[in-house]
Image (tube, rainbow, N blue to C red):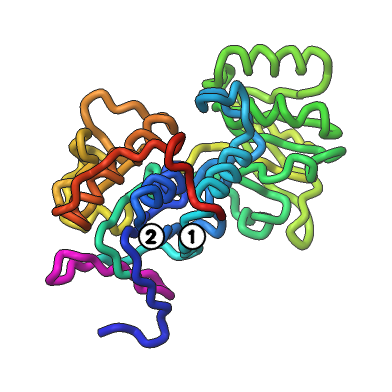
Amino acid sequence: MIDAQKTITTTDIAIIGAGPVGLFMVFEAGLLGYKCAVIDSLPEIGGQLTALYPEKPIYDIPGFPSILAGDIVNNLAEQALPFKPEYILCNPVDGLTENKDGSFTLNTATDTIHAKVVIIAAGMGVFTPRRPPLDNLAEFENKSVFYSVRNKDRFADKNIVIAGGGDSAADWAVELAPKAKAVHVIHRRNTFRAAEDTVRKMKELEESGKIIIHAPAQLSQLHGDNGQLNTITITDLENNPTQLECDNLLCFFGMSPALGPIAEWEIDLSGKKIAVTPATMETTRHGILAIGDITDYAGKLDLILTGFAEGAIAAKTAQGIIEPDKQFKLVYTTSKGVPAA
C-alpha cells in the first residue's frame, strides 16, 4: 500500500548517493535521454567531498592540477543541471521492492520513488564519525565540536584543538595554523599516519611555534557552557592531566561505514562492498547496478576518476535494461553538445 502522505516520484533511474560519482551519473544518463532521481542521507549533495573536506584541494582530477573538493561538487552539479535531476536529500533509502514488470520501488521516510533501474553510488555506504568517549560530548557537537571543516574562516583567531593522527588531522592542522590563534594537535601515539610531506610541514610549524603537538596524549574532559567550549583536559600515558584553552575541538578519528539496508537487497557482497561485473557494473540482481567506491571487482581502484568511468559504463547498461531493443550509440559531446540548463 502506498502511503498517501509520502511524495511520489517516478523516474527512469534512481541513483542512491549524491557524491561526485552519483552526480556524474546524472550527466551520463542524461546524455542518453534518461531522467534521474538522486537520493542521499546527507542534507547536501557532494557526499564526503561536501561533508568532510569541501575546502581541501584534490590533485588527481583530470584537467585540474588542483581543485577544491567543494568546487568539484559545484562543477558536477552545474554539469548535471541541464538534465534536471530530482534531489531527495536527508532521506536514506530504507526499503526496496521489485515490481512485476521488473521496475523498482524505493522508500524513504518521506518519499516513494518508482524507477526502471537502480544505481547504487553510495561511496562506502552510510558514514558516521567515530566519536571520542567523552561524557558530555553531545552538548558541544555542531556548536564547538566538529568532525569536519565546512568553512575554515570560522576558525580564524580561535584556539583550536585537533584530535587524531591521520591525514585529515594533519592536513587541517597545517591548513588552519596560519589562521588560528593557536593550534594544538592531540594524538595517542608518537607517530602520525598522515602523508610524510604533511607531517614534515606540521613539524616545521611546530618548530616555529604555530602548532603545539601533544603526543602521546588523549582527550579526557570537555569544559564550557551552553555548547561553547572554553577549555579541555588531556592526559598523557601516565594519566597526568593538562588543561588547554579551546574554542573549537576538531575530532578526526575516521568514519564508520555501513551498507545499511543495501546489505538486505539480495545482491552478492564482497566483504563490505558490492560485487559487480566490471564490463557492465551490474550486481547479481538484474536492474540494480553499482558504481564508485562501494563496488569491488578484480583490479578495482578506489578513485573518483574510476567512478566517473564506471558511470559511463553503467549508463550503457541502463539503456539495455530500459530500452532493450534500442541499439546503443556512444554520444560524443564534442559533436552533439548538451542541452541548455
State the separation of the CA atoms marked 1 and 2.
7 Å
Q: Disc 1 on helix, strand or loop? A: loop
Quadrant for the C terminus in the image: bottom right
Q: From the viewer's perspective, tell me whether residue 3 is left or right of residue 203.
A: left
Identify which residue is drawn at 28% across, 55% down. Answer: 262
Figure quadrant of residue 321: bottom left
Q: Circle 1 is placed at which residue position?
A: 84
Find residue 71 and report its horizontal and vertical position in percent.
Answer: 62, 39
Find residue 118 and report its horizontal and vertical position in percent.
Answer: 28, 56
Q: From the viewer's perspective, tell me whether residue 206 is left or right of residue 284.
A: right
**Could you tell me the amino acid type at mark 1?**
Lys
Quadrant for the N terminus in the image: bottom left
Q: Circle 2 is placed at which residue position?
A: 35
Q: Which residues are magenta?
A: 97-113
Q: How many marks?
A: 2
Q: From the viewer's perspective, tell me whether residue 121 is left or right of residue 23.
A: left
Find residue 268 and report its horizontal and vertical position in percent.
Answer: 16, 46
Mark 2 neighbour density, 10 Å: few (under 14) some (14–19) many (20 or more): many
Q: Is residue 78 visible?
A: yes
**Could you tell me the amino acid type at mark 2?**
Lys
State whether residue 44 is above or below residue 178.
below
